[in-house]
Structure formats: C-alpha cells, structure tokens
Amino acid sequence: MSISKNDIIHIAKLAKLKLDDEEATIFAREFENILKQFKTLDKLDLDDVTMEKPNVSVLRKDVQKKYEIEDLYINTKVMRETSIEVPKIIE
Amino acid sequence: MKDCSIKYLSEKIRNREITSEEVVRYYLNKIEEKEKNIDAFLLVQKDEALKKSKEIDDKIKRGEKVGKLAGIPIAIKDNICTKGVKTTCASKMLEDFIPPYDATVIKKLQDEDAILIGKTNLDEFAMGSSTENSAFKVTKNPIDITRVAGGSSGGSAAAVSADMVPLALGSDTGGSIRQPAAFCGIVGMKPTYGLVSRFGLISFASSLEQIGLFSNKVEDNAYLLNILAGEDDFDGTTVKELEKKDYTKDIDAGIKGMKIGIPVEFIEEIIDPEIKEVIFKDIEILKELGAEVEEFSLPLLKEGLAPYYIISSVEASSNLARFDSIRYGYRTKYYENINELVEKSRSEGFGKEVKRRIMLGTYVLSSRHCDEYYNKAQKFRSKLKKDFKEVFKKYDIIIGPVSPVLPFKIGEKCKDSTMHLSDIYTININLATVPALSMPGGKSKKGLPIGIQLIGDQFNEDKIYKVAYALERKLALNF
C-alpha cells in the first residue's frame, strides 16, 4: 500500500498536529512498513467471529463532587475571574 | 532492609522496634547515593516523606491504629495522578501539570499509611519499552548502567531494583510492568483488567492498560495487591461484587499437582539461547516441585502484534485528543488563532513516538480504514479471549518468557519503530485481559537477569503467586 506525503499531511490535520515536510516524508515511509505488518491480519479467518461488546454499563454514577475553584483551575495559563482566556475564535 | 518482607517491616514499625523515619531515611540515603547514576525518579518528595513518617511514628506512639503499610515508602509512576504533586507522564505536554485529585490507588495507599517517596520516570505517556522515550531523562538499569531498565515503567522497576524504594506502582498496557521487571531482576505483576481501579491513571489505551505493582519479593507483591484490589465507583470497568481474596494466604502451600502449560509458539520464538536455557531449567524445577508441565498450542499467540498496535494506537489517538492546551498543558509561545494554538502546542508538546501513535490511530479510525483494520483487530481480540478461556480449562497457569532479548544497551535499539517485536510475549496478555507476573527466572553468563512470565486465568492471581513463590524459593536468586 502506498502512502503519500499528502495523505500524511491530511491525517496530521485530523489529529491536530503540524508536521514539516521532512517529518511528513519520514512518517509516510514508516506508515508503509507498519501497514504492511497490519496486513498480516488478512491471513486469519475471522469472518465468523462476532465482535465482543461490553455486557455491562461501564459508565460511573453521575455524582456531584465539590472542588475548590483554585484547585480546579490550578493548571490554567490565563484566567479572567472564573473564565479561561483563549485567543479569539470568531474573527 | 532488602531482605525484610514488607509485612515484617511494617510490624516492626508498628511495634516500635524501628521508626518509620529511620526506614524513610534509609531509602532517602539510597536515593541520594544512587539516583545520579540511575535516573529513576522525576521527583523525590524528601520533605513530605519525612514529615509523613514522623506523623506515622507519632500516631504509633500515641497508640492509635495504623494501616497495613504504616511507614513503608512507595514510588509512583508519573502517569498516576497525585493531588497537588506534579504528574507529567514524562512529557513536555504535562511538564507543569498538577492534578487536583488523587488516583484511587493513591487514596488506598494513603488509607493504609504508606509514604509516597517520589514519582518515577517512564516512556512518554507510557509508549515505549526502554524508558529512553522520556522527555526528561533516560533511566539506567541498576544491574548494568550501560543498559536500559526496560519500559515503559522503567523508573519504578529501577528504583525497586536499586533498593531506592521497597515497592513501586507502574502501569502495563502491553508489557510495561513485566518487561522492566524482567530487565531489572525484580517481581512485576499486571493484574486482571478490572481488578485494580484505573481512576487517576492518565489514559493511553483504556481497554488494555492496568495499574500494577513492583516488589523485590513475590510475597510483598501479593501483600500490596491485597490493598489495591477491589471495586471502585470511579472506575466503571472494575469488576463488581468480586469475592475478596487474600493473595498471601496459602502462598506457601506448594504446587504439587498443579497443571502448567507452555505454548509451543512461545518456545519456537525464543531466539536467544541463554533465555531458552533458563526457561527450560525453570520448567524442570517446576516439575521437581510437583507440577505437571506440558506443551500445548495456541496459534493466535503468533499474531498478536498487529491487532495490539491497531487497538492501542486507536485508543491513544482518542485519549490524547483531550490535550488541546486550552485548559491545561504546554502552550506554544506564538500563535495567530485558536487552530494554530492547538496544532503548534500539540506538535511541540508531544514527542515523536507519541505523535507517531496518534497519527497511526487517526489513520486507522478514518472511515475508509476502520473496517479494514480496527474491526478485524477487535475480532481477533474476541477470538483470543475465547482461546485463552479454553486453555485455562486445562491448565492452572501458563508459563513463558517475558522478553525475547536481554536488557539491551542504551541507544542500541532503533527508536524509529513503533511495532516492537520485543513485545511479542506480553501484548497478548493485555488483549486477553488476563493477569501475568514477571519474575527473575535465571541469569545470563554476564549476570544479566532473565525473566520468566506466569500467566493465569482472569482473577486467578492467587494461583500465579503460589507458583511464583515456590519457584522464587527454589531459585534463591540475588542480583
């Protein structure tokens, strides 16, 4: 399977990553090798196997927990009162 | 101190034969002496540990009840959240991240009066097998510092092996506890998926990873699992209403009559003659101890690499999408708009291996390829689980190697490869969600440790510990 540099740039955009030309070229080469190995799955007969689905809910109970506001925003770069400052989204 | 069991040491602390402060100072001195050569820790909580040890000693003096780990130091892999203490995942992305809450396992340790002594190094976001992929430092193997400690929990394994701490926590997504334990000559357990809460473990591949434990001795490992195991409301995947086991009970009952299987697929794959020799020698010892050991075939074991990397990369790309650098995490200096902020921050904040896996997962999940790769990998996983269930109808445990190679030299292995053949013996265990323990099985001619892996059916950690305990006593290895 051939993976082009443009394919890689497209995937990077989906993954919210920025790659330079050199990185994209390296990734394209590596991906070809990895995907070749992924193809080993094709030789297995898995057509009759049903995919396992969780038989229980894995969601935890929706319980309210109180935090100090200072604790919750301890890692935030810039705050204005109780809001996080981010760059303009709509020009 | 290294020869004392944790149970014995904590009893001595409780009986005031030794103080917790003395124990903590012993280990802090070891850290002071050895850490500069090993680089196991990202953070040592010296002052906090000493303060806590004095509090424990005071509690004991006042005759108050203390926990099962009273005064015992423990190190924590730096992808497990500790309230108010930096938790970085060894990534520039989380270099300054301070969790506002504790992981459930941390709470359990604190409830038993354990002393958190520091946070340990890892491959960035637990992606790697050598701890060379940390954004901050490379951990060295205490047995030969020119070699890697293994990974991704290399810091925790090296800290225990170098006697800088008696116990440590790690996480295992595809072998990240068992392989470093094997490389550093100690005991490492990956419990059954769902036995120990993952709440507060910073996610990499949620359906595969499990918090687990490192110790020097098998009995200490079982003692610690007694404390960590159990249902947690904060982790919906922990198993409900499971019968509580005491893993130390009857650990010394012997293994007479136990049925042990060894997959021919494991034996065929062993290329290193020294590893092969150790595995066969250990098989003979298990037979001498009264177990029945026989070969069997489980052909799917040869094929796990592709499905493992498909599922783990897909889950990584999804889990790591949360790091947008808006609410927390590394943020780039110069940006024009919000898109540029997110893209540049993620590209600068994540290391190469992390980016590679995010990219791979995103590719596999994209609509054109989902059926081709991801659905097939999930089908493989279902089949593997069923095959394991069948095997455990016949055998109490399965044994095999941990790694096909001995601890390698730092920088020796190509870092530019995501799919590591060195994971071949460990990844299937995570896909099947069963428990497995790695312990020293012998030594190479150069004195390097060679690990042996004991694999059990779901929630059969007690059987694994029994076999491991018997083998450990008979081998009486020292590193």
Image: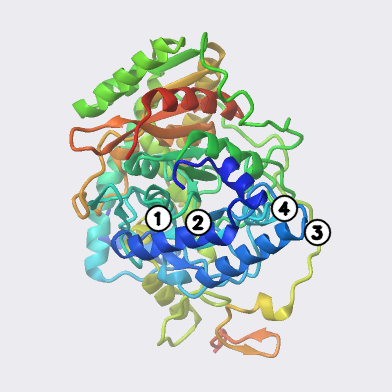
Q: Tell me residue B362's x, y (percent).
A: 44, 55
Q: Which residue is mark 4?
A: B66
Q: Residue at x 53, y 24 (%)?
A: B466
- Dot 3 surroundings within 10 Å: few (below 14), some, or many (20 or more)? few
Q: Which residue is mark 2?
A: B75
Q: Residue at x 38, y 47 (%)?
A: B161
Spatial CA distance of label 3 from label 1 is 35 Å
Does residue A27 appear left or right of residue B152 in this picture? left
Disc 3 + disc 2, Cβ < 8 Å: no
Mark nearest the camera among 1 and 2 is 2
Quarter of the figure with residue B175:
top left
Say yes or no: labels 3 and 4 on the same chain: no
Q: Tell me residue B318's x, y (percent).
A: 52, 56
Disc 1 residue type (three-letter): Gly
Mark nearest the camera among 2 and 4 is 4
Mark nearest the camera among 3 and 2 is 2
Q: Residue at x 36, y 71 (%)?
A: A18
Spatial CA distance of label 1 from label 4 is 29 Å
Chain designation of label 4: B
Quarter of the figure with residue B228:
top right
Does residue B177 appear left or right of residue B277 in this picture? right
Q: Which residue is mark 3?
A: A63
Front residue (pair B23, B381): B23
Say yes or no: labels 2 and 4 on the same chain: yes
Q: Tell me residue B335's x, y (percent).
A: 42, 86
Chain designation of label 1: B
